[in-house]
Amino acid sequence: MADIFNSFRPRTGKVRAALLIACCGGALLVALALGGRRYFQSNERSKILGDRLTASTERSPGNLENIEARTTAFCGDCHRTPRADYFARARWHNEVERGYRFFDASLRTDLSPPPLAEIVAYYRRNAPEDLVIKRPNDDSPGHLRFRKLPVARDPGSPASAPAISFLKSIVTEAGEPPLLFACDMYSGELLTIDMRTEGPIAKRLAQVGHPAHVEPCDLDADGAIDLVVADLGSFLPEDHDRGRVVWLRNTGRSEGSGRSAGYEQIVLLDGVGRIADVRPFDPDGDGDQDLVLAEFGWQTTGSIRLLINDAATPDDPRFSSRVIDRRHGAIHVPVWDWNGDARDDFCGLISQEHETIELFSSVGDGTFQSETVSPPEDPAFGSSGIELVDLDSDGDMDVLYTNGDTFDSYELKPYHGIQWIENRGRDGWTTHHLTTMPGVQRAVAGDLDGDGDNDIVAAAFLPERVLKDQKHPASEFDSLIWLEQADPGQFVRHSLERGHCQHVALELVDFDGDGRLDIAVGNFQAAGEPSPATLWLNLPTTE
């Protein structure tokens, strides 16, 4: 996603500013470029703003009494007031000036902004000289051993570097190894990786615009495994109407024919912004499959939408679209029945200036009640993804949350990392910070060491520009780690790979059928890396 859409996602252009931020948060699908919340309405208006900013910049800070209250009143009207310690001191002039430009472009007239120089002085006075990045002392991979197996590219694939934004494993036939599906959001290929071959090869299944996410489904209720794809509509972040939801309808008509079936492409929704995620979903408990989707958009577009299955008969699904939440920046919308009422609910990660996680519970009449799972930490928090998992094995669903987007400022952030948001039932939600990891894009949970509890694997993406501009060698940073749950709720960090922070996609699955979870890691525009993915086969520890 990230964000690369993301949310990278590559996130579609997340723009995090200090005052009026339009960031992607998360996913790399959401960020490959910077921008304001709205385009300037005219060249004349831009000139007026430029003159005003120049005059304000040249003016002395003036009276700084009550500046904190005035900053909170102004900046906090649209989003959470930015924290001074989220940027180094020297960065704050640019961040504040960018925020004022966003405010002007919003055309709002109901706020009285303090003088820019006073806001800059306030943030510079409270900001650290530099953001200190500390590398964890975790050189050991722990007691697990892996064999790396690169996935070969089909000879007919494009010559461009792979840009794998998402990986999904699907068991299509009983007793057979799972198929691994990969979305290449640059080339537009939906790839399949089959472990039955002597060496894994990524083969093109379909060409689908700029795919960000794929999920198995059975929209026509014929027993065959179909696929539904979120199409961003563009690789780079833009506000446009080229986003789509595409149904790959299995034409094999035989149950479990995922490997051999052909697929008919059917567009279920178009004319919308960049779509980062789509999930099958039954909020009304009527037995058919509806869809919930994260329309990340960018700066002026975006929402969370439902596609309601209005078909009279299951074999001819027809969908109508309805907006559930009008905020832009949605990255992920994983589905779960949280209250056990046989109606699906979903959890939404909304990035950009919002940087929040909310639970949307289905009431059953087509409406939803929302509950905040994780309130905004800061507009520049850098959300990159969420995963639902019962991490503490207490019978309810928790949230695994990553924040590692660097496309907002192209700076390394010491607060990037992995959070476990514990579901405490009637006592609400408790956030546990598990570890820091600059650039972390994806974290997934599973019992990697076979001891009966859930561990965590996480991957990172750091653009070359980030490392070059800040004079940090890539070898300083982990690109793949696992967190061993040594005791209930207590995790020990182990480094698996360092210096190759070109990963935004990750999946855990037993590829070779030996009873141990293996790791699949997607490669995203890694220089000189022709392989779209690498499999890390989990070896017996006694060998």
Image: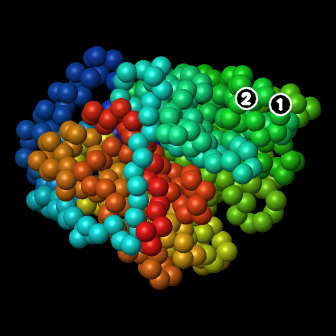
* Residue drawn 37% across the image and 21% down it: 159
> In the image, 300: left or right of 123?
right
Residue furthest right in the image: 313
Q: Is residue 36 above or below residue 82?
A: above
Amino acid, disc 1: Arg
Q: Along the polypeptide, which appears first: circle 1 or circle 2?
A: 1
Out of 118 and 152, give the one closest to the viewer: 152
In percent of width and height, residue 387 lies at: 54, 57
Amino acid, disc 2: Ala
> In the image, 306: left or right of 405?
right
Does the CB distance between marks 1 and 2 fall below 8 Å? yes
Residue furthest bottom in the image: 487
Crowding at label 1, few (<14), some or many (≥20) Cα neighbours within 10 Å?
Answer: some
Residue furthest top in the image: 43
In percent of width and height, residue 359 lies at: 62, 58
Q: Which residue is mark 2?
A: 261
Quadrant (top left/top right/bottom left/bottom right) for the C terminus: bottom left
Q: Is residue 288 above or below residue 357?
A: above
> In the image, 110: left or right of 63?
right
Q: Which residue is mark 1?
A: 253
* Residue drawn 48% across the image and 67% down it: 540
Question: Is any atom of residue 341 visible in this view?
Answer: yes
In percent of width and height, residue 210 lies at: 50, 27
* Residue drawn 54% across the image and 76% down it: 451
Q: Secondary structure at mark 2?
A: loop
Q: Quadrant of residue 394?
A: bottom right
Q: CA distance from mark 1 to mark 2?
A: 8 Å
